[in-house]
Amino acid sequence: MTRTIEPTPQSADEHSVRDIEILWDDAWNRHDADALADLLDEDVDFINVTGAWFKSRAEFRERMAQTHRGIFKDSKRQTLETSVRFLSPHIAIVHARWEMSGLRNPDGSARDPWQGIITRVVMKRSGNWSVVAAHNIDLAVTAGSGSSPAGL
């Protein structure tokens, strides 16, 4: 006899929170700045790998549109590992290790794949999860690739 275990509300929420990373990769790989920004709260605080601090969804959207026409135009992002920790039923911290390929150096030569970790604070409002704060960091810089891509 097989017994089916019904998902608990938290496991359904954890699935929804983890889906943010899947949706992020999908939007990134389509170079869709609007879809990326739609995962964020209107007044998000988002710090990228170079320390640029975006204090709204609109600021973030504008920068993503710009960089996806430039340095990120051929990039592909893949989440390698995700950790979710609930602080309350409506707030969670997410750590995700990611890898990016398809980047180019200023001289046009191919860059080695690049890895980082993003920490997101996500909040559930009116049944939907969105990113209210994020901080993205580089992992070790690969040999010969220089520093983080400029102009993020």
Image: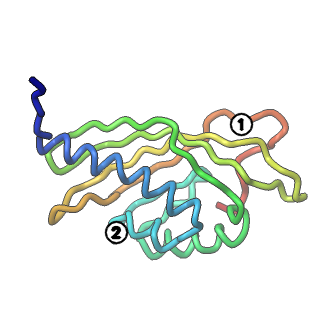
Q: Residues within 10 Å of mark 1 (few under 14, many from 20)?
A: some
Which amino acid, by three-letter code, is at mark 1? Val
Tell me how many marks there are. 2
Q: Residue 121 location, x and y as percent?
A: 33, 49
Residue 69 drawn above or below residue 128: below
Q: Determine whether, in the image, residue 64 is placed left or right of residue 1.
A: right
**139 and 28: which one is in front?**
28
| The image quarter in which residue 104 lies | bottom right
Return the residue at label 2. Answer: 43
Residue placed farthest to the front in the image? 1
Badge 2 marks a residue whose secondary structure is strand
Point 43% across, 57% down: residue? 23
Which amino acid, by three-letter code, is at mark 2? Asp
Q: Determine whether, in the image, residue 136 is placed left or right of residue 14.
A: right
Q: Residues within 10 Å of mark 2 (few under 14, many from 20)?
A: some
Point 57% across, 66% down: residue? 30
Pointers 1 and 2 in contact (CB under 8 A)? no
Return the residue at label 1. Answer: 141
Task: Indicate the quadrant containing the C terminus: top left, top right, bottom left or bottom right.
Answer: bottom right
**97 and 135: which one is in front?**
97
Badge 1 marks a residue whose secondary structure is loop
Q: Residue 77 location, x and y as percent?
A: 59, 51
